[in-house]
Image (cartoon, rainbow, N blue to C red):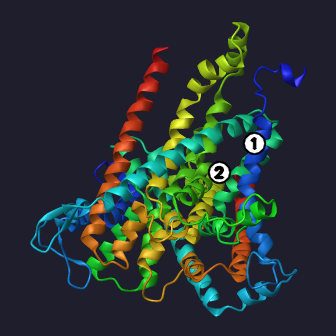
Amino acid sequence: MKAPTKTPDWNVLGLLPAHLIMLLTLIIPIGIIIVVSFSTRGPYGGFEYVFTTAPYKQLLFNEGWTGELEFNPQYLIVVARTLVLSAVTTSICLLLSFPVAYFIALQRPAIKVLLIYLVTLPFWVSMIVRVYSWIIILGKDGVVEKTLRGLGLVDNMDSLLFGNTAMLLGLVYSYIPLMILPIFASIEKLDPALIEASHDLYGNRLTTLRRVILPLTRPGMIAGAILVFVPSLGAVLEPTLLGGGKTMMMGNLIQLQFGGARNWPLGAAIAIVLMAAVMVFLIFQGLRSMRTEGLERAA
Amino acid sequence: MNADDDVRRYPGFGLFSAIFFAYLYLPIAVVVFYSFNANRIVSNWGGFSLHWYATALSNANLMTAVKTSLLVAAVATVASTLVALMAALVLVRGRDVRFRRISEAVVNLPLLLPEIVVAVAVLILFSEIGLANGMVKLMIAHTTFCIPFAFLPIRARLQGMDLDLEEAARDLYATGWVAFRCVTLPLILPGVFAGAMLAFVISMDDFITSNLLNSGGATTLPVYIFSLIKQGVSPQLNAISTLIMIVSVVLATVAFLLQRRQ
């Protein structure tokens, strides 16, 4: 006979360490971030618990000497740039990944394994090294410039480094393996009989792609979009190293406020905006995939 | 059957994939290529040389950073794998686990947040409780964000495991602990190992959190490399990068083979 009151609850005990760590190092500190974003900046960095909405106002306005507010879009531009670059990164990754994932899925098992290994390998290679490689390629006297000059295409070109294009290239390069893998998984699950059926019903390759393959691999694309979009929104290395000091994204703007600029409340406010953006996106995608699942079940 | 007649194939996808793989590996090849450049200026080829590897290996700051990274990663890997294993056993095997989905989301919380937010959270936490030891800060922070990376492969392995074996052990009067140690653990070991390996690599590779917490003499390898990049492109940097890549590729290959051998 078991005495239910005496046996320890293994379920609770097993989860306790993980939950305790997340509670103490993330959940409570995120609460503190919210508090900091409504606090006053300390005289030597840090913050003081004096309530103010100044950090959020600072996101949109400059405060003049007499306290009048003047609209200043500098931070808004950073937020907009972050959203646009992440969206473009995700779209480019989607476009590039589908043909590659599809091609891999059709190979013999041994080759398939090898190609998937090759896709995941860069993910294991240090992120900072992969971003650094683009400095060598795009920089002054870099590989791209030399090649173009060697071919006689350009004489004197502006450095490709430091700007939106360089950041975009770096972002796509960093995160594309995370798009290929889920799309590959969903193509693998696709029943080839459906493609043959579409052709038997006189659908050509394009129609089959549009009406059969793409709709059925949508869950993989949604998963890939999440895996690429979320880290792009929070990217720090790519904007710091490839964007130069002036074209920032939210990630390195936050880092700057907690580092050199020593304006913790402003940094906290931007972090809240970033977290809100991620949450809105995740909820939106969650609803979309729920609808897709619902349609599949109804069909 | 002729390949052209296979309705599943799309023309051009092969060529496209070939270009894609070139794009994926060319930047890495460029770094490796110029690491053998005798010239001090990276993109001016001055003949083959191993000079920069010798410089890198005798760089004391680099070696200190490697030691810091290894120590932090070792602690974070052991701690996060143990915690993740316990959580996975409950979440996959436990009966009547309340709030299973929310519990799992909490374990995976670092994956749902941009890393800079995780970094800011731990930075503010450590400043509030007044923790000053750089190494301890890094170990705690790395353990936190490594947990989901250790958790997911273990969970996958547990989900794929046959429950009958464990029940058979219990039928043969093995106690819960003996059944776990002699049956369950050996079976899920590849998953545990893969999870630990992933946690180790994620910790070694981390820049965002380690950079924000960087103080108290605890500079990790990526943070040190970042400081070198800020000083400008150099062949020594390429040599260091190449050495790191060799280690990464070996680790990745071991992990990959382990996961394949099911």
Secondary structure under tag 2 reads: helix
Can residue A8 be seen in this snapshot? no
Nearer the observer, B215 or A261: A261
Q: Residues within 10 Å of mark 2 (few under 14, many from 20)?
A: some
Quadrant where the N terminus of chain A is found in the figure: top left
Q: Kindly identify which residue carries mark 1.
A: B17
The Cα–Cα distance between marks 2 and 1, rounded to whole angstroms, is: 37 Å
Mark 1 falls within which chain? B
x, y (%) of residue A111? 82, 42
Q: Residue at x 68, y 53 (%)?
A: A120
The disc labelled 2 sits on which kind of residue? Leu
Q: Residue under label 2, please give it.
A: B187
Query: Could you tell me which secondary element the residue under label 1 belongs to?
Result: helix
| Residue B208, x across and y down, in percent | 47, 69
Above/below status of B96 relative to B32: above
Q: Is residue A95 visible?
A: yes
Say which amino acid is labelled 1: Ser
Q: Residue furthest right?
A: B1
Marks 2 and 1 share the same chain: yes
Direction from residue B9 to residue B194 in the image, left or right? left
The answer to which of marks 2 and 1 sits earlier in the sequence is 1
In this rendering, would A230 be left or right of A154? left
| x then y, percent, for residue B214 | 45, 81
B177 displayed left or right of A7: right
Label 1 neighbourhood size at 10 Å, few (<14), some (14-19), many (20+)?
many
For the residues carrying marks 2 and 1, which lies nearer the camera in this image?
Answer: 1
Circle 2 marks a residue in which chain?
A: B
**Residue B47: x, y in percent?**
87, 81
Whether residue A255 sits left or right of residue B199 in the image: it is left
In the depicted structure, whether residue B244 falls above or below residue A278:
below
Q: Are marks 2 and 1 in contact (CB under 8 Å)?
A: no
